[in-house]
Image (spheres, rainbow, N blue to C red):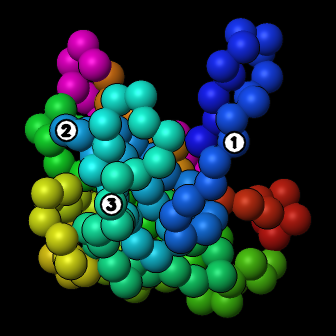
Amino acid sequence: LLRDTTGDGAADVIRAFGPGGGTGIAFHDGFLYFATDDAVVRWRWQPGQLEPAGPRDTVVRNLVNRRQHAAKGIAIGADGMLYVNIGAPANACQVQDRAAGSPGQDPCPLLEVAGGIWRFDPSRSGQSQSDGRRFATGLRNALSLAVDPATGTLFAAQHGRDMLFGNW
């Protein structure tokens, strides 16, 4: 947490808390939500405070977290639901990942547990990935999620596949 109390454009109050590194962050209904590589946690939050008032609560645990595309983007939708990107742990679902000329798998077995956006109830603790519902599929790694406040539409910025020139 950073706060500039003197108005000089530089943070003079710096505080750290939480489980360590992560990617996604969102405020919703009095809570700060934060996504690590394998979970979404939350803290009750009051406007203006610099640290959570109590312990964290784990909303979703045991999300797919493999070597590639482990970071989790999150957003709270206009419907009040929590949307979580679960990146595919592969480049393009090839038989041999990132190998020149290796064909893609059809259907792609990774899409059962990754490569899309899952939807969860943000008010429920202790969920696992299987408690969520797949909202979108076939997205290699849609790390940036945002909701248009005017329409409520969920948008995602996806990282497409790598190595097209080198492999093909």
The picture quadrant where one finds residue 164 is bottom right
Residue most toward the right? 166
Distance (Cα) linking label 2 and label 1: 25 Å
Which quarter shows the N terminus? top right
Which quarter shows the C terminus? bottom right
- Where is mark 1, residue-wise? 14
- Where is mark 2, residue-wise? 29
Q: Main secondary structure of the magenta part?
A: loop
The picture quadrant where one finds residue 13 is top right
Residue appearing at x 40%, y 51% in the figure = 52
Front residue of 64 and 97:
64
Q: Amino acid at mark 2?
A: Asp
- Where is mark 3, residue-wise? 54
The percent coordinates of residue 16 (x first, y second) are 62, 54
The percent coordinates of residue 153 (x first, y second) are 25, 29
Residue appearing at x 45%, y 60% in the figure = 35
Viewer-side label of 2, 1: 1
Q: Amino acid at mark 1?
A: Ile
> Does residue 1 appear left or right of residue 27 in this picture?
right
The range drawn in magenta is 149-160
Upstream in sequence: badge 3 or badge 1? 1
